[in-house]
Amino acid sequence: MPAEIKLFACLKDNYGVLVHDPASGATAAIDVPEAAPVEAALQATGWKLTDILVTHHHGDHTGGIAELKQKYKCRVVAPQAEAGKIPLVDETVREGDTVSVGTLSANVIETPGHTSGHITFWFHGDKLAFAGDTLFSIGCGRVIEGTPEMMWTSLKKLRDLPGDTRVYCGHEYTLANIKFAQTIEPDNVALKARAAQAAKQIADGAWTIPTTIDEEKAANPFLRADVAVVAASIGMAGKPAAEVFTEIRARKNKF
């Protein structure tokens, strides 16, 4: 049976998401910025929280762990490299590990850059990727603990997932990301279409995620640093992709 997804808002611009296995009744929260919206989502769906899967240690992704674990006695799974910075961890995982949520199974992909131990959960059977603050809709996370080269490598890992993989990210930044992306590739047809789509989604009160890997490959400049037209557009024709990515990320930091 396919996974069921409940998406909802948390804090100022965070996303919360529940992944439910209808076959077993198990339900995982992917990161928990705060407890109350998670509880509201559980009440709305009638699901019971069994697991919390943590992508990285930042407080706007872990703030609800203690309250939810106390109430639901749920398992907390976290990246091995950051477990000491995350409360109440029961199980640590790293690249190549798998995590089960009932009959659902997720591969762990290490995607450092935003933080040094960031991970992505890829539910391969359902083609769902929960990328935290590594890959955003038309964007990527700010490089805080890692290096731009590290982030570029992480993004390439995600880019290599099947094109129809649905990507859920940690924040609603799509419109701002599109405005920046248009400064890099103003003539990108896919980006123009995405801009119109996102504007309508926001106007209609809808979410701009999930996106897909194919959509991001077509329009997200951070996944396109090795595309010749992108390098040329910022005066870096022929330069290594990691250097092009570094320049794009630096420009976004100032945007």
Image: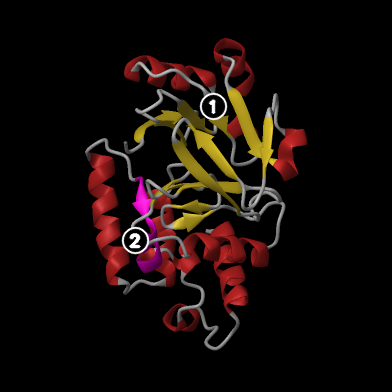
Q: Residue at x 46, y 36 (%)?
A: 13
- In the displayed structure, 78 sits above or below 156; it is above
Where does the magenta region start and end? Answer: 209-218
Q: Secondary structure at mark 2?
A: helix
Q: Is residue 212 magenta?
A: yes
Left or right of 252? Residue 178 is: left
Q: At x 53% / y 66%, what residue is drawn?
A: 156
Above or below, 195 against 81 in this view is below
Mark seen at residue 70: none
Q: Which residue is mark 2?
A: 215
Tag 2: amino acid: Glu
> Which colour scheme appears in the figure?
secondary structure
Name the kind of residue labelled 1 in the image.
Asp
Quick check: 94 above or below 216? Answer: above
- All told, the count of numbered labels is 2
Direction bottom: furthest residue: 238
Residue 132 percent across, percent down from the top left: 53, 44
> Residue 244's spot in the image, x, y percent?
57, 75
Q: Is residue 108 rendered to the left or right of residue 189?
A: right
Distance, label 2 to label 1, CA atoms, is 30 Å
Residue density around tag 2, few if under 14, some if 14–19, many if 20 or more, within 10 Å: some
Residue at the spot x=68%, y=27% of the render?
A: 90
The residue carrying mark 1 is 51
